[in-house]
Amino acid sequence: MILKNVATAVEDVEEIRVRGALGALRERHLVALRAPRWHLRVFAFLVIVGPGMIAMVGDNDAGGVTTYAQAGQAFGYSLLWLFPILLVVLYVAQEMVGRLGAVTGVGHGKLLRERFGRFWAAFSVFDLLLLNFLTLVTEFIGIALGFEYFGVSATISVPMMALALLAIVVGRRFYRWERLVFAMIAVSMLTFVLPFFVGHGHAADWGSITHSLFVPGIRGGISTNSMIFIIGIVGTTVAPWQLFFQQGSVVDKKIGTGFTNYARADTFVGSVVTNLAGAALVIAGALAFVGTKLSGGQSNALTIAHGLSHFVTPSLGSLFAIVVLNGAMIGAATVTLASSYAIGELFNVNASLNSGLKEAKGFYLSYVLSVVAAAAIVLVPHLPLGLINLGVQVLAGILLPSALGFLILLCNDRELLGPWVNSPWLNTLATLIVGTLLQLSLVLTVGTIWNSVNIALLIVLTAIPVLVATVAVGIVQRQKVGQWRVPGSNLLARGEWLTPPEVLTQQLPRSKGRTFVLATMRGYLVVAMVLMVVSFAKLAH
């Protein structure tokens, strides 16, 4: 008995390397993991899982759920081909940011500040905070409309859920917060049930669904309106806040380079789940309105829930409302945390859920203010809630290329990452992704200015420079295949690499070319944002 108590005491004081919602990895586990024991590897994955999964599923928030369903209502199954492509885009972006957090041990905002200076970091964080706040507004829109479906007034539901959001964060540890979010993720799995409901003669056309998944097409043809929805789907699937959230949570959870493969698996599983859920919601939106007078338009979450209830079956409408409410809570919890991480990192103050109120006042204060302000805006009467929701997702798609551009530069910083810098093939793929995103926003911008422009021809013409740039980067990277790794960058060296502390306080050498590219992108994005507002005014009319 005495020996058992001693052993228990030793285990209790044994250093915990990583603590997650589903367990903790201690020193003895790290030693055991070197042996090929599958059950220990599964245990390690269950401990590590969280940052990637939450970042992905968290983007299927109220705004995302509504946008996917709106796309199904407006274009049927025809936009489903986007999801296999976005699975790759999402994984590539989030793998890079997760690797940054694991190798450097600091958040995304701090890396931007230290390597690019406060000026560019402030620009990036300002974009993020604006977008995150508007996203948080869409979460409370989802809360208001979801509860309204069940007959609860927004004046009751919005303040009530705002208090709940404060309660799940303030004064908690990261692993406890993670457990609560995991419970909400479990509820979100109800999304996969939506396409299988049948009623009033409505049933999913699985032949058309399979065809649309693998053969690109747009019902009604390419237009400015369809470009808005395509960018909106991109923006709600891959959002800038995810970069800040996942890197911040990897650091908060203390996931180092020794767990990189588990973190990648976490990111991949999350990417698959979130894209399958998005496709399920598009199918549900199409299922609700196919053959009705509302098909081809767009509605808010409440109208979609009523449509599912009326045209299919009442239980489907209730289930959709529950999915919206649950998505709103997941999104609000993660987006506000991403904003708090970014503010703390930009101003170099404590930004961790593992810190108490006294140690991280600014971190928690920014969280509380964001929640209260967003909740107050949603209570303003006569707001065009459906249009606001879609607009926020499109804005995320427009701002995404800038965020990914900074991410690629950081992931090619050899002083920062050493043997963990991007491989040549990854840089080539990332160039194609960023170029395509810029192309989409450019097409939307030009289509807004010149209504008579041939959108299909414009897409072909703008694709040419994207392909040329991708091929050029591929050729340059191919020539550097033998040079991109630093000396000693074998598996052992990568496992032992630590970012030198002095690098985290040094800016990159000034480059006229880099400054010109960043300034040009910044100017273009400002113009694109203004014209996006114009296009939405036309859409509202």
Image (cartoon, helix red, strand yellow):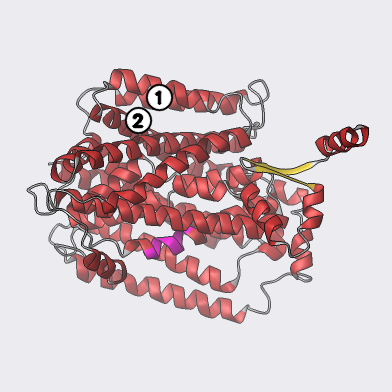
Which label sits in the foreground, 2 or 1? 1
Structural crowding at the residue carrying mark 1, measured as other residues with C-alpha within 10 Å and reported as few (<14), some (14–19) or many (≥20) = many
Residue at horizontal 22%, vertical 66%? 208
Amino acid, disc 2: Phe
Structural crowding at the residue carrying mark 2, measured as other residues with C-alpha within 10 Å and reported as few (<14), some (14–19) or many (≥20) = many
The tally of labels here is 2
**Marker disc for residue 140:** 2
Secondary structure, mark 2, is helix
Q: Is residue 431 left or right of residue 297?
A: right
Residue 377 location in percent, x, y? 32, 25
Residue 112 location in percent, x, y? 59, 47
Residue at horizontal 31%, vertical 71%? 214
Amino acid, disc 1: Met
| The quarter of the displayed image where residue 273 is located | bottom left
Cα separation, mark 2 vs mark 1, equals 8 Å
**Marker disc for residue 161:** 1
Of the pair 317 and 223, the residue shown nearer to us? 317
Taking 128 as reference, is 425 above or below it? below
Within the magenta stretch, is there residue 86? yes
| The quarter of the displayed image where residue 266 is located | bottom right
Of the pair 337 and 517, the residue shown nearer to us? 337
Residue 390 location in percent, x, y? 28, 44
Of the pair 246 and 521, the residue shown nearer to us? 246
* Prevailing secondary structure class for the magenta stretch in the rendered image: helix
Taking 478 as reference, is 107 above or below it? above
Q: Is residue 509 visible?
A: no
Of the pair 15 and 531, the residue shown nearer to us? 15
Residue 278 location in percent, x, y? 35, 53
Residue at horizontal 20%, vertical 38%? 314
Residue range (magenta): 84-90
